[in-house]
Image: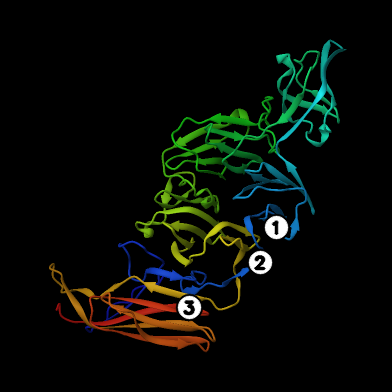
């Protein structure tokens, strides 16, 4: 960011220090930070305060999602922006959403909303109807040399079948005595009390008792949409499922055409931990492996398993597709995966092991909320520079990008919009220790000398009314205030004199608009004592 200046010819030394991001490890570079609060890389290569968040005013929100508006779950009701979706009640707890064409799918509730312009209607993905007085009638008629068989089920005492099912649905029929009339059948025609099925293998029968018709959807632990199919996986059965094209309600269509649904059992060890669509493939994660499904239609689908770091259990909401690269939290940190190998991008976290991670992005930054033990962290990864910064300790349960606005669901049940506020925010920057021992001598034997004095020059911008306090701590002593400035707007150069010590730390804190532009260290080499 800032190139090192050449050493001066005198004993006095001057060097411009790069301004870098967080580093929680012991292997760090001068200019990296041990902590930060409400700091961003929005003015990269400088370090600046972030803009404040705005509270949208919603209460008791348990889930959010962005798809042609901001969807929120509040007290068991689903809203798109301010409008409630009528006729839909959801269970409590966290949700998974997936958007395909005009349908918004909601799990684990197995509901979906059909979106037709401003009209939004709620539907059940599963359906069941049962009644008595059911009769199977099989008729045959000749069409030239071809015999056409029609199988029709008429049922007298039943709910309106057209309110539950649609032509093309694959349903399971139960209640008849003959096995030919049981099992999976595809609806060819439909009325309120009559179903004609495509299969020509039924026989005439009148049922003695109750007959049921049911459209089942598998229980899916994780879901995503790829090529206009709903994909998901079930850990109990170790199965991957794909719905019929453009139809998230049908997973049992095995009629043999390109639109068929599909499923496969997976024999690899471990539970699934998440899934995502990326670059012509569906990616299913386990903690230490990645399974890739390739193909355009059911008969062509194939799976390939790779041994590499996947998504950590409980971190499925950390998966973000940014420019056809997946970012996610694994067992040892944050990884990127672009279809080849998974690469760790969080070496600077040191021994921290994050859990319960939730993420979002705005194309420039990867926003990550996670727990470090019991301590919440809200971090940003600036993709252009590769710098990590900590914003604060807010706990997010969902993060959704609606248009250009990043929305955060906090653990208080409120929805906050990132970088939309204008009020002053408190900030702090704490640098990793600067060591005062330097190499001395021009021989192959290197001695370490201490500086006679060291001085920092901080060049910064302060907005009108903003304030900054500069503190120094020498050799693990107490923090000492060096100066405090109240800004009138404009540039400030602040000298900071450092006493003779082995190491020192620098902390800047305050409130309001602040940007650190430059940091110059000046010192004169002394003896080794």
- Residue 275, quarter of the rendered image: top right
Q: Regarding mark 1 in the picture, which secondary structure is present there?
A: loop
Residue 342: x and y in percent read 43, 47
The disc placed on residue 69 is: 1
Q: Regarding mark 2 in the picture, which secondary structure is present there?
A: loop
Q: What residue do we see at 72% from left, 28% from top?
A: 171
Quadrant of image for the C terminus: bottom left
The first of marks 3 and 1 along the sequence is 1
Residue 243: x and y in percent read 65, 35
- Residue 177, quarter of the rendered image: top right
- Residue 266 sits above or below residue 202 on the image: below
Closer to the observer: label 2 or label 3? 2
Q: Residue furthest bottom?
A: 488
Distance between mark 1 and mark 2 Cα atoms: 14 Å
Q: Residue furthest top?
A: 145
Q: What residue do we see at 82% from left, 12% from top?
A: 146
Q: What residue do we see at 65% from left, 62% from top?
A: 59
Distance between mark 3 and mark 1 Cα atoms: 34 Å
According to the image, label 3 marks what residue? 515
Distance between mark 2 and mark 3 Cα atoms: 28 Å
Closer to the observer: label 3 or label 1? 1
Left or right: residue 448 versus residue 72 is left
Q: Regarding mark 3 in the picture, which secondary structure is present there?
A: strand
Residue 263: x and y in percent read 59, 30
- Residue 448 sits above or below residue 24 on the image: below
According to the image, label 2 marks what residue? 56
Quadrant of image for the N terminus: bottom left
- Residue 296, quarter of the rendered image: top right
Q: Which of 413/103 is in front?
A: 413
């Amino acid at each position: 960011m800032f190139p090192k200046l050449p050493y001066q010819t005198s004993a006095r030394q001057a060097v411009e220090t790069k301004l870098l991001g967080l580093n929680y490890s012991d292997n760090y570079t001068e200019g990296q930070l041990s902590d930060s609060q409400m700091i961003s890389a929005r003015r990269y290569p400088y370090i600046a305060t972030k803009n404040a968040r705005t509270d949208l005013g919603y209460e008791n929100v348990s889930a959010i999602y962005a798809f042609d508006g901001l969807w929120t779950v509040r007290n068991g009701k689903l809203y798109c922006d301010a409008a409630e979706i009528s006729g839909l009640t959801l269970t409590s707890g966290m949700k998974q959403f997936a958007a395909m064409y005009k349908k918004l799918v909601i799990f684990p509730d197995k509901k979906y909303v059909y979106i037709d312009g401003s009209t939004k209607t709620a539907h059940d993905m599963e359906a069941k109807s049962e009644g008595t007085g059911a009769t199977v009638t099989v008729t045959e008629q000749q069409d030239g040399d071809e015999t056409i068989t029609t199988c029709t089920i008429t049922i007298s005492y039943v709910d309106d079948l057209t309110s539950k099912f649609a032509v093309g649905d694959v349903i399971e029929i139960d209640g008849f005595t003959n096995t030919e009339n049981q099992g999976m059948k595809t609806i060819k025609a439909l009325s309120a009390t009559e179903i004609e099925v495509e299969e020509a293998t039924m026989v005439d029968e009148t049922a003695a008792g109750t007959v049921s018709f049911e459209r089942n959807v598998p229980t899916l632990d994780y879901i995503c949409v790829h090529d206009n199919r709903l994909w998901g996986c079930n850990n109990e059965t170790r199965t991957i499922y794909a719905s019929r094209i453009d139809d998230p309600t049908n997973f049992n269509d095995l009629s043999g055409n390109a639109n068929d649904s599909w499923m496969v059992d997976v024999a690899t060890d471990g539970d699934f931990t998440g899934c995502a669509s990326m670059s012509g493939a569906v990616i299913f994660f386990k903690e230490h492996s990645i399974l890739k499904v390739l193909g355009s239609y059911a008969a062509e689908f194939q799976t390939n398993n790779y041994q590499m770091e996947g998504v950590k259990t409980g971190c499925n909401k950390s998966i973000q597709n940014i420019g056809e690269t997946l970012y996610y939290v694994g067992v040892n940190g944050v990884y990127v995966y672009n279809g080849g190998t998974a690469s760790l991008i969080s070496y600077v976290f040191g021994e921290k092991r994050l859990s319960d991670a939730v993420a979002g992005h705005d194309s420039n930054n990867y926003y990550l909320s996670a727990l470090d033990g019991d301590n919440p962290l809200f971090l940003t990864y600036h993709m252009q520079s590769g710098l990590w910064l900590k914003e604060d300790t807010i706990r997010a349960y969902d993060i959704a990008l609606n248009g250009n606005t990043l929305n955060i669901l906090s653990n208080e049940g409120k929805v906050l919009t990132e970088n939309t506020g204008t009020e002053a925010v408190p900030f702090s920057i704490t640098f990793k220790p600067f060591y005062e021992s330097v190499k001395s001598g021009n021989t192959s034997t290197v001695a370490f000398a201490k500086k006679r004095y060291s001085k920092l020059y901080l060049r910064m911008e302060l907005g009108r009314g903003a304030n900054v306090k500069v503190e120094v701590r020498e050799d693990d002593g107490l923090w000492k205030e060096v100066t405090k400035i109240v800004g009138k707007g404009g540039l400030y150069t602040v000298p900071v004199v450092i006493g003779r010590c082995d190491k020192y730390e620098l902390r800047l804190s305050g409130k309001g608009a602040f940007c650190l532009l430059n940091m110059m260290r000046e010192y004169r080499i002394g003896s080794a004592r």
